[in-house]
Image (spheres, rainbow, N blue to C red):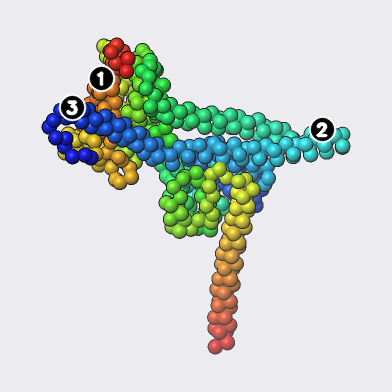
Amino acid sequence: MDHNGKAQSQPVVMIVDDEEMVITSVRAFLSLETEYDIHGFTDPEEAARFMETHPVDVVVSDYLMPKMNGIQLLAKAKQLQPEAARVLLTGHADKQSAIQAINDVGLFQYLEKPWDNSQLLLVIQSAIERTQLFRSLREKISELDSAHTSLKEVQSRLLRAFL
Amino acid sequence: MSDPAPVNSHTLDTVEELREELDLTQRKLAEAHKMASLGRLSAGIVHEINTPIGSILSNNETIRRSLDALKKLIATAEAEQKALPPKASVILETLANLTDIDKLACERIYAVIRSLKTFARVNESDLRKVDIHEILLNTLKLSGCVFRRRIEVVTNFGELPEVECYPGLLNQAFLNLAVNAAQAIQGEGTVTVTTRQVGNEAEISIADTGSGIPLEVRKRIFSAGFTTKPIGEGTGLGLALTREIVEDTHGGKIWFDTELGSGTTFFIRIPIQQPRAQEQA
């Protein structure tokens, strides 16, 4: 989907944080360093709705948010778009619950606030790479599937022709 | 604790000693309670400060990189004797935006620090005339660090003159009530703080939309050592200390209205002016 008039092939990065300030900072940095199509949300429910209709490569989410916490959002993201990489960016001091949740939602990476921009960029880059590999793997598998199906058809037609 | 004193001429001295010891223990308990409540708030406070610090650090780096990029654009434009490309104005706009964010972030950090500073003055022994609303706002700022994502705070401040009180102690009493109110609410809800003047007294009420106080808890609620909170969440001293601060220290009154399923309101009334004798203390 093309939202900001950018080429469709640009990786789509979602930043979800109830603090507008965090979104602005991350967006400014990523816009300067990359060509990513960046979507920021202060409302996790709105972010989840966006994912229902738009393919996303990476979701970077805060943990403590009203209505829905980061783990709940990422669980929803996993359900909607399993191959989109999930990153938790949190300032929550109680790591225990977050670490436990890493296993539940299959986090790609866990980052703490205050974050380091270069590290964040590195994580997002490798997350995108992973997502795109998953997608092309899935495409290849479905190509193989359809090749297999058509081969079978040819085979059965051949059999019918000769028997 | 020592054995009961024998009944002799020393009894009075011993009683006096024991009373002093008790006073000291009580003060230590109050101090321990304050540290415990601060400790429990600290995770929220750390989160509250980490967010703007994260923004400032990130912005600082982005600003530096933007300046480098801008420098290159200018150098190229000068060398080629051309006008600056449109990207330059995009970068300039980003720079302005980020410095605005930095200012906001610093203000956020400063507000938390300021509310901590007033709270740290609990042992301030001077009776002073203060703006109760300012104390309340600082208290709500601190408890908001922990609860603001699920609790909406409504302030309904009436006209109040400056109130003569021990600000640090009152701060602690308000914090206890504000934290209790937020904890009484499962999930999302509202805490409403109302003030008004009633005769020569200031009335402060803190109402929650929580579960209400069960009948069997009501009569023990102001007793020291009684708590319904899980281990690690309550010391069982909060309301006992709050009652002591309001009634014993300030000569005021504390009471509550509660209804199961719809919420609780705690009321505090303290004299606007303390009696002269107490001012000497």
Discs 2 and 1 lie in a common subunit: yes
Depth order, front residue of B219/B87: B219
Q: Secondary structure at mark 1?
A: loop
* Tag nearer the camera, 2 or 1: 1
In three-dimensional space, the C-alpha distance between marks 1 and 3, rounded to whole angstroms, equals 28 Å
- Mark 1 highlights which residue? B251
Discs 1 and 3 lie in a common subunit: yes
Q: Amino acid at mark 1?
A: Gly
Q: Secondary structure at mark 2?
A: loop
Identify the image quadrant of the N terminus of chain B: top left
- Seen at 48% across and 27% down, the residue is B114
- Residue A88 vertical placement versus B278 (above, below): below
Residue at the outermost front position: B9
Give how far across and how far down residue B58 sits, in percent. Answer: 61, 40
* Tag nearer the camera, 3 or 2: 3
- Mark 3 highlights which residue? B12
Depth order, front residue of A82/A97: A97
- Circle 2 marks a residue in which chain? B
Say whether disc 3 or disc 2 marks the residue closer to the N-terminus: 3
Give how far across and how far down residue A160 sits, in percent. Answer: 54, 83
- Seen at 16% across and 37% down, the residue is B4
- Mark 2 highlights which residue? B83
Q: Amino acid at mark 2?
A: Ala
In three-dimensional space, the C-alpha distance between marks 3 and 2, rounded to whole angstroms, equals 94 Å
In three-dimensional space, the C-alpha distance between marks 2 and 1, rounded to whole angstroms, equals 75 Å
Bin the neighbour count of mark 3 within 10 Å (Cα to Cα): few under 14, some 14-19, many 20 and up.
few
**Looking at the image, do the residues carrying marks 2 and 1 touch, with CB atoms under 8 Å apart?**
no
- Seen at 45% across and 30% down, the residue is B116
Depth order, front residue of B163/A137: B163
Give how far across and how far down residue B278 sits, in percent. Answer: 29, 16
Bin the neighbour count of mark 1 within 10 Å (Cα to Cα): few under 14, some 14-19, many 20 and up.
some
